[in-house]
Image: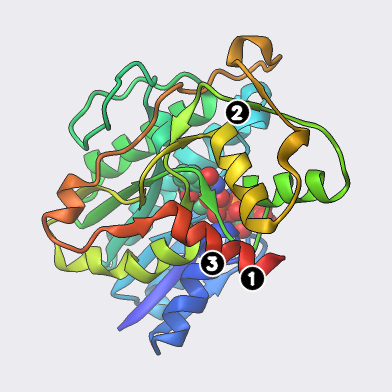
Amino acid sequence: MKILLLGGYGLLGSDIYNVLVSKRYEVVRYTKRELNLMDRKKLETVLKYYNPQIVINAAGYTDVNRAQNDFQSAFDINCIGTYNLVYSLKKIDAKLIYISTDYIFNGEKNEPYTEEDEALPLNNYGWTKLVSEDIIRANYKNYYIIRTSWLFGLNGRCFPKIILDKLKNNKKVEVVEDQIGSPTYTIDLAENILDVVNLPYGIYNITNSGNTSWYDYAKLIAEYAGLDSSNIISIKTNKYFEKVKRPSYSVLSNSKWKSYNRPLRHFSEALRDFIDKVI
Ligand SMILES: NC(=O)c1ccc[n+]([C@@H]2O[C@H](COP(=O)([O-])OP(=O)(O)OC[C@H]3O[C@@H](n4cnc5c(N)ncnc54)[C@H](OP(=O)(O)O)[C@@H]3O)[C@@H](O)[C@H]2O)c1
């Protein structure tokens, strides 16, 4: 089975690549310079030439803060880029696996969001991801949209690395206690990602099990790393000066996924593995 992976050098994409290669799949990945979502002509040429059965798009504009000031770039890459990809895919009819996010929700629910819940993003990044989902749904049949959340992994910037860095350097770090979500280990998602292609087309929430606040998550990181957590200061979102609104609750229900597959392990177990690797 031939797989083409976009974003294969990013936080999630690197682990998708490593895991699939270790399972002996034939995977090609490209850097942004080699294959840009904005270059529809090249996308068409590469897809036609390589003719993959599966295309995984883990590429995108992912900087939530920057998207708030630069909606145009986020929109171009996440929305126009997705349109370019879908348009090019029509010529080869491959299965598309697209990665989306919990940030399409406004967080007003107090129980896990299902795939059918109405999405109403609070920030520009969330809007571009929601629109990209709509572009796929309106224009392509063979799609799997995987919504995941709070990714952490070895190959990129992520919350546990930031916390470890601060604590190792004996710096204080303020962390919000009133935003709840499910941290998800990129390796765990990568291990499961291809299982969707045996399922009906559609949207699937896939995250590690369990949920936490950013503050409790930071404390757990310190505990697992054997670092003093007294430099982690709990704050409320409204005390934290940030231009970008984020959902206060964005736990995704994995019930649909669990009706077909084993649930991903608890995030704390995955975090322990991660910490063992980075410490
Ligand atoms: N990180 C999270 O917590 C999180 C949570 C939920 C969902 N997601 C979703 O998961 C996916 C992967 O996220 P991630 O955290 O792994 O992101 P990431 O580390 O920022 O990786 C994204 C990759 O896309 C590439 N890229 C950017 N613009 C491109 C373009 N125009 N054409 C081709 N490639 C381009 C980037 O290349 P450069 O580095 O060279 O720019 C980078 O390698 C995204 O769709 C994101 O929305 C992420």
Residue to which mark 2 is pinned: 72
The x and y percentages for residue 64 are: 60, 32
Label 1 Cα neighbours within 10 Å, binned few <14 / some 14-19 / many ≥20: few
Secondary structure at numbered mark 3: helix
Q: Can residue 253 be seen in this view?
A: yes
- The quadrant of the rendering that contains the N terminus is bottom left
Beta carbon at label 1 within 8 Å of ligand 1: no
Cα separation, mark 1 vs mark 3, equals 6 Å
Q: Do the residues labelled 1 and 3 touch (CB within 8 Å)?
A: yes
Residue at 36% from the left image edge and 66% from the top image edge: 55
User: Of tags 2 and 3, which is closer to the observer?
Assistant: 3
Cα separation, mark 2 vs mark 3, equals 38 Å
Secondary structure at numbered mark 1: helix
- Label located before the other in sequence (2 or 3): 2
The x and y percentages for residue 115 are: 21, 37
Residue to which mark 3 is pinned: 273
* Residue sitting nearer the eye, 216 or 47: 216
In the rendered view, tell whether residue 110 sits above or below residue 203: above
Residue to which mark 1 is pinned: 277
In the rendered view, tell whether residue 114 sits above or below residue 236: below
Beta carbon at label 3 within 8 Å of ligand 1: no
